[in-house]
Amino acid sequence: MSKLTSRSEDYSKWYNELVVKADLAESSGVRGCMVIKPYGYAIWEKMRDQLDKKFKETGHQNAYFPIFVPKSLFEAEEKNAEGFAKECAVVTHYRLKTDPENPQKLIVDPNAKLEEELIVRPTSEAIIWNTYRNWVQSYRDLPILINQWANVVRWEMRTRLFLRTAEFLWQEGHTAHATKEEALAETEQMLDIYADFAENFMAVPVVKGVKTPSERFAGAEETYCIEALMQDGKALQAGTSHFLGQNFPEAFDVKFTNKEGKIEYAWATSWGVSTRLMGALIMSHSDDYGLVLPPSLAPIQVVIVPIFKGEEQLKQIDEVAFDIQHKLKNLGISVKYDNRTEYKPGWKFAEYELKGVPVRIAIGPKDLEKGVVEIARRDTLSKEIQPIDNIEVYIKNLLDKIQQEIFHKALKFREEHITKVDSYEEFKEVLETKGGFILAHWDGTEEEEEQIKEETKATIRCIPLEGEREEGVSMISGKPSKQRVLFAKAY
Amino acid sequence: MSKLTSRSEDYSKWYNELVVKADLAESSGVRGCMVIKPYGYAIWEKMRDQLDKKFKETGHQNAYFPIFVPKSLFEAEEKNAEGFAKECAVVTHYRLKTDPENPQKLIVDPNAKLEEELIVRPTSEAIIWNTYRNWVQSYRDLPILINQWANVVRWEMRTRLFLRTAEFLWQEGHTAHATKEEALAETEQMLDIYADFAENFMAVPVVKGVKTPSERFAGAEETYCIEALMQDGKALQAGTSHFLGQNFPEAFDVKFTNKEGKIEYAWATSWGVSTRLMGALIMSHSDDYGLVLPPSLAPIQVVIVPIFKGEEQLKQIDEVAFDIQHKLKNLGISVKYDNRTEYKPGWKFAEYELKGVPVRIAIGPKDLEKGVVEIARRDTLSKEIQPIDNIEVYIKNLLDKIQQEIFHKALKFREEHITKVDSYEEFKEVLETKGGFILAHWDGTEEEEEQIKEETKATIRCIPLEGEREEGVSMISGKPSKQRVLFAKAY
């Protein structure tokens, strides 16, 4: 197995190699689209199942809406249409026919042109709010709390596996409410669910905040987000929750009779996370040896590798290993015993390091004599000897400990890479030398935001919702600022 | 709540009304595409989870491949391309722009024409086998056992909710093997999994069989299927498993070095079931009052309805109902207690009958005095009084019993509607008067098959794999036949 490019050498190359070599995903024969391979998909399934559980616990139900948005619906909410028009895949025909000039080839049948073009959904507000119109008459029909797991397409010109692909998988929640307050509470609740998931399952610390107007979702009144920091000092938006006000309800005429008998437009939210989270997971924890996975998202949490010469030794180890495997499984731990004879232990060690299996147990004949095994942690690459007796309890606690420590390591890194600056000079210097998040004062204008972006490539990731609210003055214009905002270069 | 059209009056109308009124699905603003509503989606999720479990237990893993198939890949396997070319959605452009003549409108940007058109996948053999080429070098890389849960698009001209929609949800398994025998065994294994699922979870009896050449999947060497019989005497294909031979491996050049060091093409299978199963479920069991769901697929298995006058009575019932609910939940039963005061018990009874909740528990003040409740079965519409004491155990057993009895009722119907005929006259008469499956001899030619189809609209659903193999002569040509085949009009 050839080694990965190191992170210090070329972070971007390291990422691409890791995604492919660890069997997470690969580019497909379709421009900008990826194949999510079984190992990568297994991690995504764990993310999906955990989020789905949280959505259902908070009263949401899943449903499914069409992948196609007729152009007339697509353009109904003006800002949303404007935001996505430049990057959407358009279906114009519904049939192919044999090429009369080359019978082995197919061509688009010009007689099968659609009367109205169909957009492959880049997001589903339009099609969903067009449906909600018939579902909402009275306040009794509200709230509607629906989520959809789906594929969406945004025709991005520069794509990267998981981080930016033409097609990606995501969930999109779309809720309708009787009051503004309720819709706002929903928006915030979903942001909290995302933050909790990122920190406690992905072990990725996030800053919760609000986007500036220029960074808002097209059609939203307010976009809440969680922002994570990658190991190369760049930020990654890991989830967004939008308060849509009455924009879509007005565009699609979704009205209801309130308790007082008056007719009102509904209030809307939408919120989503995508396979982009896979990128955040990989870039938060992994190292030059491969993936580092928090136990809660690892498809294989423990691997057992036998060290043996000859069949007789393997047989003895098999017995102990199957017993440990059985005991671990009973505790709900996913464990693989790899006793294949065609691969050497060293090869297996490297393979499971690359794949990010959190704990490896190695068992050799001398270990058996002493009643011990060797336990290796993937995250710290440390090894220790532990008695076989009650090993399952030890491993269970170790997995919990690893989950915590991976998070705290990432948190420490994040804390070390949040810098407060007060001058634009310092801002540029920190950005250049250290990277990471920069907390600085901004005068609230789009002009200043744009200037900083053009001159430094840093954007305002969010206006943080938590932490101290220190007043000050903008580092450029000198105008007053109520709180520092979070800048970074971003994925 | 307005009543459903009865089945005897207009079966087709009954079906459409039921799907909409029971909140399973509805037509969308997009031609031929449906919205799967939360209640319908919850049933589909249960189907999906159960199938997914079975796939994983037999060594399959999930993955995800692009929704778009470039035209050059699409046409690579000739028969497959020919089969789907007439009904595929084609993406030709990747951008919209403002209409210069009407700035409120968007038009397709002629400068954003794709160099190569993209087909929205009607099935994924092409894109997947194009990917497998890079995954397979040696026999050690085989088998590849992959499944995908995805949406697909087939531009059907006449659509019906769940049964035939332009977009539908499905799973598609795509496996690669080193030998023909192994691929055939996989094809048969997956057919068995589908049959077991249909009978034991959906309570829908099925006939396992093989399609005639003219009914095969485009590109398959052999198509296995399960066929179910609906209450109106029409058949419904509920799942297919294809032995693809080496057609796709040859078309996409997927070769490997076998154990003897020789280079061979891989062997292929694919297999799928779709949201069409929802149609099979509905039309197998439901009645003029609404859905009848087998307990294993019911999102709500038990509903408790209080019968009360005034708050004091409700309070007393609440106490008992919450206790029953708690005990049922502990047994893994999904139970809803509907103590809403704005709806009357009669309304609730009709509602849960429409939604097919298998068991209803009604509790009134007199019941409480006697320590009993009223239990109503949805499938038989029968009622009985049972003591509250240990009611949870009674209900658990009752749910098992209902599951069995729904299946046996459907099986009895199916058995009563399989008719053996020996003359074409009789064939036509049975088809006209009684419908159902007809077992008859066929001479094995496409001509005779086509003649029967044209003259009667009945098709050969399958050549059954099980049951007696009675030799005979074709009812039309008089030529010899090795076994009777299964005819029916079909969805």
Image (cartoon, coloured by chain):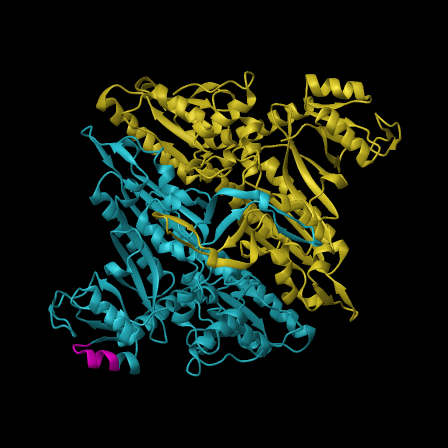
Chain colours: A yellow, B cyan
Q: In the drawing, does residue A398 fall left or right of residue B182?
A: right
Quarter of the C terminus of chain A within the rendering:
top right
Q: Is the magenta stretch mostly helix, strand or loop?
A: helix
What x and y, as percent, mark residue B149? 44, 49
Q: In the drawing, does residue B307 fall left or right of residue A94?
A: right
Q: In the drawing, does residue A443 fall left or right of residue A406?
A: right
Regarding residue A468, the answer to whether it shows in the image is: no
Q: In the drawing, does residue A222 fall left or right of residue B481?
A: right
What x and y, as percent, mark residue A99? 38, 50
Work out whether residue A159 or residue A378 is closer to the camera in this orientation and state it: A159
The residue located at (76%, 54%) in the rendering is A181
Quarter of the N terminus of chain A within the rendering:
top left
The residue located at (72%, 31%) in the rendering is A459
Regarding residue B122, the answer to whether it shows in the image is: yes
Q: Quadrant of residue B128?
A: top left
Work out whether residue A161 or residue A224 is closer to the camera in this orientation and state it: A161
Work out whether B73 lies above or below B350. Answer: above
Residue B19 belongs to magenta span: no
Work out whether A424 lies above or below B270. Answer: above
Residue B426 belongs to magenta span: yes
Give the magenta range. B421-429
Q: Quadrant of residue A59?
A: bottom right
What x and y, as percent, mark residue B80? 33, 51
Work out whether residue A153 or residue B304 is closer to the camera in this orientation and state it: A153
